[in-house]
Image (spheres, rainbow, N blue to C red):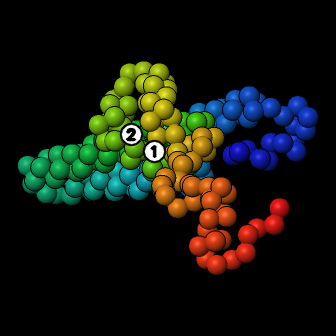
Amino acid sequence: MALEWLKPILGDAYTEKIEKAVSEQIGKGFVSRTDFNELKESKKSTDAQLSEANKTIESLQAADKDIEAVRKEAAEYKAKAEQAEKDAARELEAYKFNAWFDGLVAQNHGRDGAVIRTLAGTERMDALRKSQNRDEDGKALFDDLLKNSAYAFEDQMPPPPPYAGGTGTTSFAGDNAAMRAAMGLPAEKK
């Protein structure tokens, strides 16, 4: 159970259905503080680069430089600023997808998100990233993974131990008298 802290709060009203609904809502609406802080720092860095580019452009315009050189440098800084915005948007989209997928892993009681990503494969993860209907496609992916790789999920049985034929599978109860006689032991008392 991922939400053990919920039992003392709800008491007798606690059910698996309530836990699943709470887990689903947490997965949809919240992200971890470390991920949020990391993204916040990335945005600050991008804003700082943009601010620096704007200051450089302003200083170049104020200086008595050749107008052609100013235009060239301004275009370079503008391109850098646009690239920084594209990079930030791409990182934000990747972060949103990863948070959404981690929510699905938690909702489906996955043991480890990295293992489930590996089991899904890069093609299916890329297709899910590009999907127009992520919720349905994600549900289909997890249904398939639950069916074919159930051991990767908490509420599923772990894989059985390997079968070892031979030793331990044969009963010697009927052959005790013959074995005792072969070893020179007295007959077993009943």
- x and y percent of residue 95 in the render? 45, 44
Q: Residue at position x 90%, y 38% from top?
A: 11
Instruction: Report if residue 55 is visible in the image.
Output: no
Residue highlighted by disc 2:
120
Rendered-image quadrant of the N terminus: top right
Q: CA distance from mark 2 to mark 1?
A: 6 Å
Q: Is residue 56 left or right of residue 160?
A: left
- x and y percent of residue 138 in the render? 46, 29
Secondary-structure class at tag 1: helix
Q: Amino acid at mark 1?
A: Ile
Q: Kindly give the residue lying farthest to the bottom in the view shown.
A: 184
Depth check: give the residue in front, 172 or 38.
172
Q: Residue at position x 49%, y 58% from top?
A: 166
- Do tag 2 and tag 1 residues touch (Cβ < 8 Å)? yes
Secondary-structure class at tag 2: helix
Residue highlighted by disc 1:
116
